[in-house]
Amino acid sequence: MSGKKNTAAIILAAGQGTRMKSSLPKVLHHVAGRPMLWYAATLARQVATQTVAIVVGHGSEQVQAYLEQEKINFEPFEVVEQDKQLGTGHAVQQAYPVFTRMASQKPDQFLILNGDTPLLTKETLGSLVDYHQAEGATLTLLTTVVSEPGGYGRVIRGQSGEVCRIVEDRDASSEEKSISEINVGTYVVEAGFLGKALTQLRPQNAQGEYYLTDIIEMAVQQGCKVVAWATGDFLETTGINTRVHLAVAEKEMRRRICQRLMLAGVTMLDPDRVIIDDGVKIGRDTKLYPGVMLEGQTVIGEGCIIHGNSRLSNSLVGKGVLIQDSCVLQEAAIEEGAVIGPFAHLRPGSLIHRKAKIGNFVELKQTEVGEESKVNHLSYLGDTFIGRHVNIGAGTITCNYDGFRKARTRIEDNVFIGSDVQLIAPVTIGEGALIAAGTTVTDNVPANALGVSRVPQINKEGAAARRRALLASSAAHAMVKIHGETKDLSSQPSPPKSKDPT
Ligand code: UD1
Ligand code: CA
């Protein structure tokens, strides 16, 4: 791709996307964990040398809020409102003044792309721009040949193969509809021509819209050079109009992500059955079992093993971590060599230090677990700090909520907590303390003390045997108390036998 010409970009993202049947603006529907618009804006930013104008309209508040949030990634860019969506040509008309009033150098050429074509690659777009410049064309459009061209604009070529015009699906004759070369909706247009052509658009078509595609015939009629760059990869050019297309894009994007990661040294037992978002990073020699889902900005270190059906969302995982089956991690951080699961739920604010172990059916929230500490079975720990080399016994629960406020629990280094302990927060267990199994801790426990709160045990000699004997004799007379009266059920008539269900 050459940087010789000043290239601005316009992204069309104002359409309603009626065929999506959604209250969410089309360009905010996700593909591999990111709104479709992210792909268009990132691509435009990579190829353009100047401002990217993004035309928004339908659901513009939501779209603008999203762009605001991602703005450092797309700058310099400008958002343009298209109040009424009168067509793709009308959308470009709204964006054009952004560039005419620019104080800095005016663009030589425009890259125009649809916001609903998320699979388009930098390589293809780069080739389009290169071809445009090499041909010295006024207008270059991206086309491809598809087996089901329905819904797309068809490329009408003349006798010697030259591009004449685009006819939209709804305006096409049945003969034109049989053409399988389609307009992708991606163009490179010389600035001088575009400005004038936009003023000449008229909404004379089946939809009563201003079609951007009309500028192709205009250029031809004005004797300007129009060429097409045909890509063989039709999947890449898929425009998302329905949820069926969305699923196609999702699948293809995930395939690319898995391929990129595998080539970078990640093992996947079945790449068709792992779901990895575009923003995820994974170190080499990490191994993913089927059913793993890695979402958002999750980062996984080298040499980890993640077993089936675990879902990690916006989490950080250090080197050599083992995550066993069916774990859920949300905004959690796990340091090197820790072991998680199976069946662990690490909620936001969970921080697991080196070589700690979080085991079966453990739920953590806003909880830090120190180096080599263990929470192995059946616990809930919330708003808790745990030091190093601590053992948390099975069934230990922090009672962090009194119905009004959350309170914190602090467990210092080398503490041993027996099974089935309740810690009524706020409470601190001092270093090296020992809490006896079954204890309900209501007060702080000093360092190296033994905390115990239990009802003293009594053993009644022979009581078990006496009870058994009593039960055996009463089984003969199935005595039962009904409304205060004792009845002998063994003398009751037996219920009628039910019919054989066959
Ligand atoms: C458009 C092309 C068609 C091409 C297809 C490729 C036109 C007239 N047709 O058709 O030749 O084959 O894309 O996918 O250009 N938009 C606006 N404002 C509007 C209308 C649309 O910003 O007033 C945006 C949409 O948000 C969308 C893009 O433009 O991102 C394309 O609009 P859409 O309605 O999907 O056009 P298609 O019918 O698919
Ligand atoms: Ca479309």
Image (cartoon, rainbow, N blue to C red):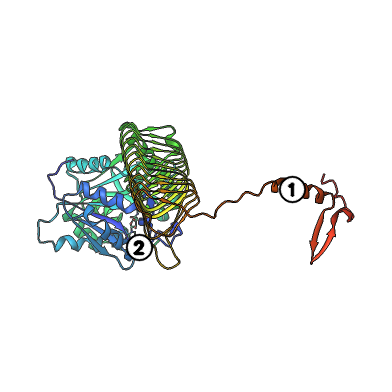
Number of the label disc, if any, that sits on residue 60: none
Q: Residue furthest front?
A: 461
**Residue neighbourhood size for the residue with mark 2, other residues' Cα within 10 Å, grouped as few (<14), some (14–19), many (≥20):** some
- Percent position of residue 394, x then y: 48, 46
Q: Mark 1 points at which residue?
A: 466
For the C terminus, the quadrant is: top right
Question: Quick check: 394 left or right of 74?
Answer: right
Kind of residue sitting beneath label 1: Arg
- Percent position of residue 130, x then y: 20, 41
Question: Quick check: 306 left or right of 480?
Answer: left
- To which quarter of the image does residue 228 belong? top left
- Percent position of residue 301, x then y: 31, 38
Q: Which residue is nearer to you in this view: 39 or 448? A: 448
Question: Quick check: 501 left or right of 318?
Answer: right
Vertical comparison of 371 with 350: above or below:
above
For the N terminus, the quadrant is: top left
**Residue neighbourhood size for the residue with mark 1, other residues' Cα within 10 Å, grouped as few (<14), some (14–19), many (≥20):** few
Vertical comparison of 225 with 52: above or below:
above
**Mark 1 residue element:** helix
Camera sees residue 216: no
Kind of residue sitting beneath label 2: Glu
Question: Quick check: 482 left or right of 341?
Answer: right
Q: Name the residue under label 2.
A: 209
- To which quarter of the image does residue 75 belong? bottom left
Say whether marks 1 and 2 touch (CB < 8 Å): no
Q: Which residue is nearer to you in this view: 266 or 329? A: 329
Camera sees residue 490: yes
Q: Which residue is nearer to you in this view: 123 or 323? A: 323
Q: Does the residue labelled 2 lie within 8 Å of ligand 1?
A: yes
